[in-house]
């Protein structure tokens, strides 16, 4: 292992889920959900990557794959150069044991309420990771460390909070407990899955500031999943990181946070920008998509997956799948419009009907 | 006025809207709890104008849902609701909502004032097709089912759904965004005049939320609706809403048309809330959280309930209740003694045009 090795490296990752048909559908072939396709991404130490996109576009699956909670059906995921799943399966020369990898990669869930045991006091919940990973720590030290971390995240008096049950905490407080629990493992990467959008608008900046402070202090990298570009901007830009835009299993644009916000290249990124409310009293008009609903990931459109909704789609987008093209040093985008000489420019536009469902005209009228 | 007035009149009555469809007067909800009396809605008064979109904004636990349930006398037990709620139908006599018997309330809900509650996606019965819900609702209210289903189809199509497919599906076979749109169609099938929505889109991604808001705007125009939209997310609703009513600690603290709120809010809480909101335009270093936290309903601070968090608070604020008052204009109401100093003390982190008139 060399020190230049990225912390996490995803190479051409694919995650397909086999799903059987409906409950009464015994005869049809199981269908395949294309959750993630062809994604390559490196996460460095002390890095921040925010994945944005609509529900069902594969953000969480990609995030879980990056931290070794989801086995990819294709491609590879490695931690400091060690293939995570070879470590798990004890295949080849395993330099970093799977147990160490698991501990180094932690997650905070979207709904902090459901991830905390309702019958356990905060202290007990937070002692558990220390018991498990630091077996020789004394009970007194353990409690002291938990209290110190609670104080660190602003939950004072810490003794009071430590003795509460989850139902005695507000949403923001539950989220902090989940953050402390993850941090007590001293992880290298924390996946925060919609951990911010679950909070009230007025509490989001505070929570993100806290996470960023801890990133600095504990050298933790964050992979944050969000459907909200405002949160992604704040978090990634402050953390000196990148925003990755996902659409139907593919990473369609990635780059430095402010670059993605101020100079978005992919038509889908522009749609997400439209969807982000501004506080400037500018009328935003109709959604700039040709269909409101995202297509079924069991049957993703051929060619560019966005072609059924893309306002810029042309005939060429139906047949061929765009690769990632370099815009700038760290800015990549998967759209033919980045290539001046692509046949896209000479092919006819796809019918420009207004928003509808799944790209079809509504049947009733 | 006594300095220790126990309850406050948070009176938006001074905002005489020309043609109110709902008048809410001194609405109060209390729960008797072991810890003491919990006043989760504290003398709220506001008029809702026929045909407007009113956005009710406040953080979690500020009492937004209580206000919504008060409008339909739907406060959960053992909460006690008092005050006056008057509904003015398009034609006919005003209806005293809180004086209705069960049958009267049952008719009023759905037929006149329809409600999409928080977390309502789970309100579809998982063993009944979506179409069954429409039929049941029509039958329960003795509407003509055939004509009603025609209307259901039209509503679904208005919401960019395929009517046949959706009516013939179980809720779980639809995406979250489709379920929510089907629910909005269902809530409109009995042709109500008012649609009250409590955080209707909070569980959806932002693109779907914004798309639904764009559709609501069209529905409102087509069916002559009055919309009350409740959310913690001020920026989300600012564009659709004609007026915004900001709640803090179980009371209204500022009511004005949306542009006025965005360009020159006068309540320190509203201004800080706007500055605390992540967005794409403000400089990153200028977004900052509001210090402190909102009060517990059994223990609301005396005087102005925002005073422990307010940078402008002085002795008057600690001991006296500011009460609602007109500010820049007769229609821009706020409960603050020092509203004239707020814009200088708490500058916005984004410049916004003041578009007068
Ligand atoms: N059934 C109940 N019994 C007692 N208190 C309640 C009950 N439901 C809600 N509350 C309290 O009422 C206050 C206002 O709640 P709510 O109207 O739901 O706020 P919002 O909708 O703004 O989040 C909160 O302090 C909440 O804890
Ligand atoms: S490749 Fe075509 S369909 Fe895809 S995003 Fe670009 S213009 Fe749109
Ligand atoms: S009345 Fe006083 S404490 Fe209350 S908001 Fe105004 S200045 Fe602040
Ligand atoms: Mg609520």
Image (cartoon, rainbow, N blue to C red):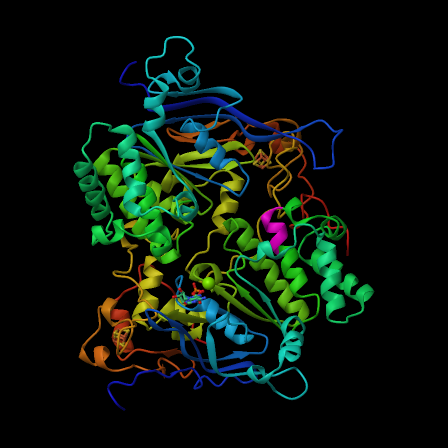
- In the image, what residue occupies the spot 78% across and 61% down? B149
Q: Is residue A358 magenta?
A: no
Query: In the visual, does A19 lie left or right of B326?
Result: right
| Residue A321, placed above or below residue B321 | above
Q: Position of residue B23 (x, y in %)?
A: 52, 82
Magenta stretch: dominant secondary structure: helix
| Residue A354, placed above or below residue B97 | above
Q: Position of residue B112 (x, y in %)?
A: 65, 75
Task: Please give the range of residues in magenta.
Answer: B175-180
Would you say residue A180 is visible in this rendering?
A: no
Query: In the visual, does B172 lie left or right of A99?
Result: right
- In the image, what residue occupies the spot 22% across and 77% down? B318
Q: Position of residue A22 (x, y in %)?
A: 70, 37
Farthest residue, direction top: A92
Would you say residue A359 is visible in this rendering?
A: yes
Farthest residue, direction bottom: B1
Locate the N terminus of chain A by quadrant.
top left
């Amino acid at each position: 292992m060399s020190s230049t090795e990225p912390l996490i490296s995803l190479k051409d990752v694919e995650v397909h889920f086999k799903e059987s048909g409906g409950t009464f559908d015994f005869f049809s072939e199981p269908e395949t959900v294309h959750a993630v396709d062809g994604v390559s991404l490196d996460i460095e130490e002390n890095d921040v990557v925010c994945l944005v996109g609509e529900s069902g576009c594969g953000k969480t699956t990609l995030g879980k794959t990056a931290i070794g909670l989801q086995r990819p059906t294709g491609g590879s995921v490695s931690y400091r150069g060690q293939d995570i799943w070879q470590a798990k399966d004890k295949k080849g020369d395993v330099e970093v044991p799977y147990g160490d990898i698991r501990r180094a990669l932690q997650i905070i869930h979207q709904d902090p309420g459901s991830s905390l045991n309702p019958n356990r006091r905060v202290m007990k919940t937070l002692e558990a990771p220390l018991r498990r990973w630091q077996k020789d720590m004394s009970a007194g030290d353990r409690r002291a460390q938990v209290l110190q971390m609670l104080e660190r995240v602003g939950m004072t008096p810490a003794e009071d909070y430590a003795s509460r049950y989850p139902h005695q905490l507000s949403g923001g407080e539950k989220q902090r407990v989940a953050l402390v629990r993850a941090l007590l493992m001293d992880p290298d990467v924390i996946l925060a899955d919609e951990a911010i959008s679950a909070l009230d608008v007025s509490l989001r900046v505070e929570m993100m500031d806290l996470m960023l402070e801890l990133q600095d202090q504990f050298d933790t990298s964050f992979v944050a999943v969000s459907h909200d570009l405002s949160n992604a901007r704040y978090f990634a830009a402050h953390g000196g990181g990148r925003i990755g835009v996902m659409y139907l299993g593919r990473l369609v644009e990635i780059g430095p946070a402010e670059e993605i916000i101020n100079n978005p290249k992919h038509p889908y990124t522009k749609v997400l920008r439209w969807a982000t409310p501004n506080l400037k009293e500018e009328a935003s008009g109709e959604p700039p998509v040709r269909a409101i609903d995202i297509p079924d990931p069991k049957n993703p459109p051929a060619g560019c997956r966005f072609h059924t909704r893309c306002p810029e789609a042309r005939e060429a987008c139906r047949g061929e799948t765009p690769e990632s093209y370099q815009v700038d040093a760290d800015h990549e985008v998967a759209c033919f419009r980045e290539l001046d000489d692509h046949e896209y420019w000479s092919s006819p536009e796809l019918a420009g009907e207004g928003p509808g469902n799944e790209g079809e005209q509504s049947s009733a009228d | 006025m006594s300095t220790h007035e126990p309850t406050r009149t948070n009176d938006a009555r001074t905002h005489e809207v020309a043609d109110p469809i709902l008048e809410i007067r001194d609405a109060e909800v209390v729960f008797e709890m072991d810890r003491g009396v919990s006043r989760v809605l504290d003398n709220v008064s506001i008029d809702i104008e026929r045909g407007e979109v009113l956005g009710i904004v406040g953080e979690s636990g500020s009492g937004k849902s209580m206000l919504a349930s008060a409008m339909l006398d739907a406060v959960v037990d053992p909460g006690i609701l008092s005050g006056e709620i008057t509904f003015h139908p398009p034609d006919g006599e005003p209806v005293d909502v809180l004086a209705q018997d069960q049958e009267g309330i049952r008719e009023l809900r759905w037929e006149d004032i329809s409600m999409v509650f928080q977390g309502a996606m789970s309100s579809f019965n998982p063993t009944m097709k979506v179409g069954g819900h429409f039929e049941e609702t029509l039958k329960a209210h003795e509407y003509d089912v055939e004509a009603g289903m025609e209307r259901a189809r039209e509503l679904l199509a208005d919401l960019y759904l395929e009517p046949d497919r959706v009516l013939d599906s179980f809720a779980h076979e639809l995406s979250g965004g489709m379920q929510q749109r089907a629910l909005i169609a269902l809530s409109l099938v009995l042709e109500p005049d008012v649609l009250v929505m409590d955080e209707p889109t909070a569980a959806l991604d932002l693109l779907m939320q914004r798309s639904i808001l764009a559709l609501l705007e069209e529905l409102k125009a087509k069916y002559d609706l009055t919309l009350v939209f409740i959310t913690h997310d001020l920026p989300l609703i600012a564009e659709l809403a004609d007026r915004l009513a900001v709640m803090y600690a179980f009371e209204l603290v500022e009511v004005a048309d949306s542009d006025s709120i965005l360009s020159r809010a006068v309540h320190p809480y509203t201004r800080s809330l706007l500055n605390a909101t992540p967005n794409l335009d403000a400089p990153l270093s200028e977004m900052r959280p509001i210090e402190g936290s909102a009060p517990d309903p059994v223990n609301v601070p005396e005087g102005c309930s925002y005073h422990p968090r307010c940078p402008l608070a002085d002795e008057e604020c600690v001991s006296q209740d500011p009460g609602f008052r007109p500010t820049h204009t007769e229609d821009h109401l706020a409960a603050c003694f020092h509203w004239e100093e707020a814009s200088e003390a708490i500058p916005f982190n984004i410049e916004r045009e003041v578009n007068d008139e």
